[in-house]
Amino acid sequence: MTPPKPPARPDKVSLWQYLRLFRRDILSAQPQRLYRAWMAEFRTPFFRSYLINQPELIDRVLKHRPQDFPKSGRISEGLRPLLGQSVFLTNGATWERQRRIIDPAFEGGRLKQTFPAMLASAEACADRLRDRTGVPVEIEEVTSHAAADVIFRTLFSVPIEHEIAAQVFEKFRAYQRQQPLLNLAAFVPLPGWVPRFHARKTRRAAAEIRALIARLTRERAAQIAAGTAPNDLATKIMTTPDPLTEQCFDTDEMIDQVAIFFLAGHETSASALAWTLYLMAAYPDWQDRVAEEARAQDEISFASMSRLRISRDVFREALRLYPPVPMMVREATCPERFRDRDVPKGAQIVLSPWHLHRHERLWEDPDSFDPSRWATENGKACQRAAFIPFSAGPRVCTGAGFAMVEGPLILSTLLRRYRFEPVEGRSPVPVAHLTVRSRDGIWLRVVER
Ligand code: HEM
């Protein structure tokens, strides 16, 4: 048995069929050959895009010449109403300045200070499950709740039950349901003459979320001014000046950043954790090993995290099989040559963690769940060359280190107390929404150990 993988489409389909498949789900709209190809070209009357799977090409785009392959403005459009000018969408000098201010808050040393808030979220999540044992539970909902709680506690020192935090979480769920972001319009660039608009409802939902975030951010600015602010990520970011200009973010800029921390930080971790728990239910031997490792610690602390090796390998394997961000898009700003082919200026370059992580010419047994692969030669080589769940290069996920503590921490905390079991007839089907989710949720039974 291998874990669920969406069926690929036939190799040849008409453009019209492709667009229809794409609208339904970006993963199953792709042909099987992408799991073997180093590169694939998609030509349509409106656009050309190139999916690249060859590690050297990926390095060129993400690590060696990222300034020549910025984020495509057309791709960002769907997110603009919610995210404004946040670091996820900007390019060039604005992006560089934003990263100079944000990155120090996520440095290794800082993670130690953030850890108690993460631990409190993990324990709160385990407590909430106490009343839900024995019956099927939709786990994506559980992990979304937990990951949103982590963001609010680490950023603003408030739990998800806080009045504003709870509203942001609720409204965001509605927003997301209205707008599967990896949809056709967001991903496949439309020609310039097609009018763009955001559904009125989506715009309104985005404005409401931003108004709530603005309240939290303004309150914090006032606390900083009064010298009463807690020492958390929001305070750190809002009081860190750019080393070059010595300017801090103003409140409006900070609102944009908080919006992306909330979005990028909770959707992704929630997806990764939900798939990890599903894999635990499907592979009970591995589940027992993670539980034993967690129970062997007197308590889970920042110091004990480095001892949770099985938990980390399991979480990493889940990120490989179900990368929360399945594809990323960049734009070629000058003519390029990829594998002896001309890539014109303006072409869209698609990087696909989904396909790269299951590439048949790179990984041994790519579709199997095998956390022990990370100790093998092939696993180590692929971790360096063909594993990009957090992207790579200067634009790598700011929260990568944070997420690699959060994931194993929540996993181990839950497995210390509970066993997760599959529910018959409820095998999840991966689809790409905002992140890789299961079409009908991930249903598991939670049993007290
Ligand atoms: C398992 C969890 C996570 C995964 C798989 C993940 C993955 C990613 C990926 C692939 C990107 C690059 C997207 C692109 O270039 O198009 C990214 C960017 C980003 N992520 Fe994460 N992320 C995770 C958790 C987090 C957390 C916890 C935070 C913050 C608290 C965060 C904040 C960001 C930000 C701010 C960016 C934009 C960076 C930039 O463009 O310079 N992420 N993430």
Image (tube, rainbow, N blue to C red):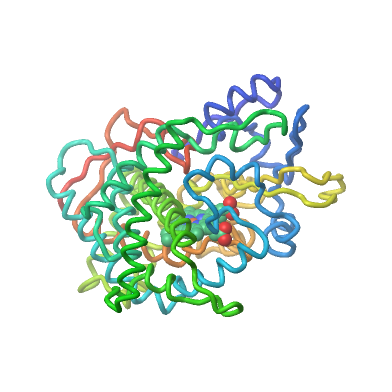
Residue 233 in which image quadrant: bottom left
Whether residue 16 is visible: yes
Residue at position x 34%, y 76% from top? 113
Q: Residue at x 34, y 74 (%)?
A: 224
Which quadrant of the view contains residue 7?
top right
Where residue 128 sits in the image (x, y, percent)? 17, 50
Where, by quadrant of the figure, is residue 421 drawn? top left
Residue nearest the viewer, comparing 434 with 352: 434
Q: Quadrant of the N terminus?
A: top left
Q: Is residue 142 left or right of residue 405?
A: left
Above or below, 45 against 387 in this view is above
| 257 w.r.t. 171: above or below | below
Where is residue 326 shown, x and y percent of the image? 54, 45
Between 446 and 211, the residue placed more toward the observer is 211
**Where 275 falls versus 289 (above or below)?**
above
Q: Residue furthest left?
A: 131
Counting every numbered tag in the picture gives: 0
Please say if 191 is above or below 116: above
Residue at image point 36% right, 46% down: 274
**Percent coordinates x, y for residue 211 in the rendering:** 37, 49
Determine if residue 316 is in view: no
Q: Is residue 298 left or right of residue 91?
A: left
